[in-house]
Amino acid sequence: MKAMQNFEDMTADLSESGVRKRVAMVCATDEHTRWAVERAREAGFAEPIYIDNVDKNAAAQEAVRLVREGEADLLMKGLINSDTLLHAVLDREKGMLPKGNVLTHIGVAEIPAYHKLIAYSDAAVIPYPTQEQRVAQVRYMVDLCHRLGIAEPKISLIHCSEKTNEKYFPFTMGYQDIIRMGREGAFGPCVIDGPLDLKTSCDKESMDLKGIVSSIAGDADGLIFPDIEAGNIFHKVITLFCGAEVGCMLQGTTAPIVMTSRGDSKESKFVSLALGVRNCLSRPL
Amino acid sequence: MKAMQNFEDMTADLSESGVRKRVAMVCATDEHTRWAVERAREAGFAEPIYIDNVDKNAAAQEAVRLVREGEADLLMKGLINSDTLLHAVLDREKGMLPKGNVLTHIGVAEIPAYHKLIAYSDAAVIPYPTQEQRVAQVRYMVDLCHRLGIAEPKISLIHCSEKTNEKYFPFTMGYQDIIRMGREGAFGPCVIDGPLDLKTSCDKESMDLKGIVSSIAGDADGLIFPDIEAGNIFHKVITLFCGAEVGCMLQGTTAPIVMTSRGDSKESKFVSLALGVRNCLSRPL
């Protein structure tokens, strides 16, 4: 088992592994998506099942059915509105979200100025996570990191400062419970700390300057954001201004759902699919 | 009047202008701050009054007194805790915040991947702005942009999506009131739009891909963030991962307060001071 430092390692490793997953590919009608899926097929780790019904609701329902009935291992979004896809995914009787599960968004980024891959949640689904939702986000993130070969992922609970503050930022109190749960082994092998700001989480020099001691020590593998606004800004700044590649997924469903945006590069779509395939595995390669 | 595209233009322009402001410099006991202040003195636009009292409370009070009594034009934070400085600034009788004014934080960034300077608020002071506080943030930002020579600044009201949503994101309804106020001339010459996400605000191609039409058109001069978590992430990602230089200030006080952090480069501190001096001017150079 080795930890993935970048997306090239991750996709090469997947190609060599012999793993091959069936992808219910919803509306891969744009050039970028089609290119990404075909490249994944050539790389050997994906077997696409194209569902290009012009009735997009029907396409989404068909893809979800394939996953439910065991004919596909994961689902990938193409040129279809997120709302339309989610409508089929969230259907109580014929959907993919088991009752009581938390649906949330996770991204994994390769940022040129950071020394390794970094996961982040939630940039797109849950507005202001409740404590229960945040616990689920941490659990999914630790699981994903394990599947990426990170034996003991360092998860940072993000806030604009390092101080807990019950009055203005009650979620920072919830952070303390998550840290305690982590210590007690609730998430498996991992290190969790917070509240920490982004610099303390990702830059040891910044941490030292502040006179703070944290087990994260500027080496975070994952960032849990306090709300969707913060997560969304992170996602958009790194892709717009930092030259980052990102792969994004939904978690909480019975199988991973690879999420892409119209503006994603074809490489981003390819990487997202590889990430979805890795997240199908019950353990690291 | 010309709009400043970058900090070099801004400081050069200030040097040539003959403007010279007296700076109450609180605890410039670290090398970076001292270097920045002396460079500003040499550049001709700042006349420092050093207040290095080892009793930091006393130093902060003395600096505030100098501004109150007209012996200094602005105040700059050195190696002193923000809380200690703010305690003196916010003192009801001897402070610098007129009753009813909103104290807020504003940054101006030069991001290598963006084509011009961009202002942002609030990364550090107001947790979750009320509508009244947000209106003040917009007003201060438009004023600052005017002082930077931007005749009709484009201010983007940031959200993770372009849809207003009363249930989950009630502040997006307040955005509509601010846009209306802007159209009615409440802030002087400016263009305000929102909710817009960061990409739509700063990248025309992303906007076009989404099929959105906005007067901001990927060319924002200023970003108003929904909460401190989002603003803080923006500030920290651009400085940590994008190679951005930033200058930061407090607004709402009777005179600008230049805010710096221990981790700031000396160039950042110099730029912050230049920004503070410009913000003392009642109109563009």
Image (cartoon, coloured by chain):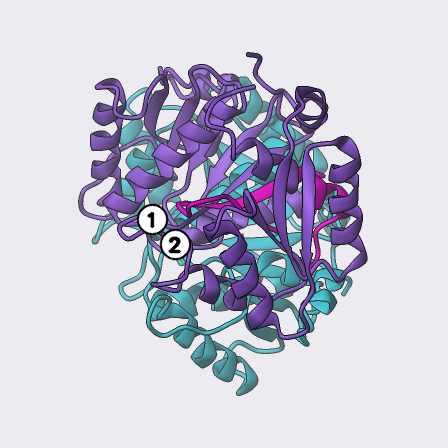
Chain colours: A cyan, B purple
- Are discs 2 and 1 less than 8 Å apart at CB? yes
* Picture layout, residue B224 above or below residue A109: above
Query: Are there few (<14), some (14-19), or many (20+) residues within 10 Å of tag 2?
Result: some
Identity of the residue drawn at 39% across and 55% down:
A253
Residue A91 on the magenta span: no
Q: CA distance from mark 2 to mark 1?
A: 9 Å
Chain identity of mark 1: B
Residue B284 is situated, as x and y percent measured from the top left of the image, at 52, 20
Q: Which residue is mark 2?
A: B126
Identity of the residue drawn at 53% across and 45% down:
B249
Q: In the picture, which quadrant includes the C terminus of chain B?
A: top right
Which mark is drawn over residue B174?
A: none
> Over which residues does the magenta segment extend?
B243-271
* Picture layout, residue A17 above or below residue B138: below
Which mark is drawn over residue B102?
A: 1
Question: Along the line of sight, which residue is nearer the eye, B215 or A144?
Answer: B215
Identity of the residue drawn at 52% across and 35% down:
B280
* Residue A199 appears in the figure: yes
Residue B244 on the magenta span: yes
Circle nearer the N terminus (2, 1)? 1
Q: Residue furthest top?
A: B1
Chain identity of mark 2: B
Identify the element where label 2 is drawn: loop
A10 on left or right of B60: right
Q: In the picture, which quadrant includes the N terminus of chain B?
A: top right
Residue B83 is situated, as x and y percent measured from the top left of the image, at 51, 67
Query: Are there few (<14), some (14-19), or many (20+) residues within 10 Å of tag 1?
Result: some
